[in-house]
Image (cartoon, rainbow, N blue to C red):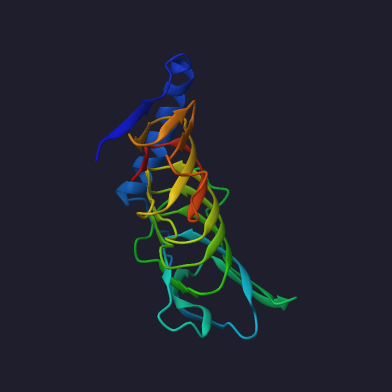
Amino acid sequence: MSVTTMKVPTKRRPFLIVIAMMLALAAGLYFSGNWPQMGAQLIHEPVSQPLGAAARADIQIGIGVGQLQIGALDQPSNLIAGVIAYQDQNSLTRAYAVHDATASFTLREQNSQANSLIKHSDDDAIWDLRLNPATPLRLTLVSDVGNSTIDLAQLHVTDLDLKTGVGNTTLTLPRQGQVQANVHGGVGNTTISIPAGVAARLSLSTGLGTVNVPDSYRQEGNVYVSPDFASAANRVDLTVSSRGGDITIK
């Protein structure tokens, strides 16, 4: 499949060179995995929340350090289920409520590195979570430090807000429905797969890196539109920004 590559304009080069050096330092420290762990131990916990009578859900998930993996449940009786691991120096917030048939679920790690200039990774801290495939979802995901693999292909996501700090992101969008999605990346590459049969309108921007889009999309400045977007039943309106890294749409 051929792609169109858009390079970043060079008029801001002196400023971008300084930013590039800072981002390269941060990325190097993270991806090397060699920064000392300060004796942190991992806490492993199961996650399971029944769906109950809720007809839709707002889900907020925030991981501080580690790998975030999101997919679809095989058994739709639960809203969410899986296993998480987090460092014992961090704290965890869980909350669940139902109001007017809308479930609100929050699972958030309070990252002890949040105010630290130097951040380290922990590849053993994995959040492997599965969501109900039949329930309409408003999904907010935050990953501070670590790679993210987000597979929404079988999920009924209507709104997505994904924010990452340091790490690579792989996102697969839903196969059906109309989706409003915003992806804000920090340092790392962002790869987004749009399933066959799904139309898209893309607004893409990167501070340092390139943007790669299939040639079949019509370009209007920083916006790319698939040929059948206006009339498609299944479509996504997607905004992606990255401070440092490539954005690839496929």
Q: Quadrant of the N terminus?
A: top left
Residue 74 in view (yes/no): yes
Residue 41 in view (yes/no): no
Between residue 206 and residue 66, name the one nearer to us: 206
The residue at the far right in this view is 100
Label count reads 0
Across and down, in percent, residue 128 comes to 41, 70
The residue at the far left in this view is 1
Between residue 93 and residue 173, name the one nearer to us: 173
State left or right for residue 56 relative to residue 70.
right
Question: What residue is shown at x 51% (from left), y 75% (from top)?
Answer: 134
Relative to 189, say whether 21 is above or below.
Answer: above
Across and down, in percent, residue 121 comes to 39, 55
Q: Quadrant of the C terminus?
A: top left
Relative to 12, say whether 208 is above or below.
Answer: below
Question: What residue is shown at x 48% (from left), y 56% (from top)?
Answer: 234
Across and down, in percent, residue 29 comes to 37, 44
The residue at the far top in this view is 11
The residue at the far front in this view is 231
State left or right for residue 116 relative to residue 148.
right
Across and down, in percent, residue 214 comes to 33, 38
Relative to 216, say whether 143 is above or below.
Answer: below
Question: What residue is shown at x 48% (from left), y 73% (from top)?
Answer: 133
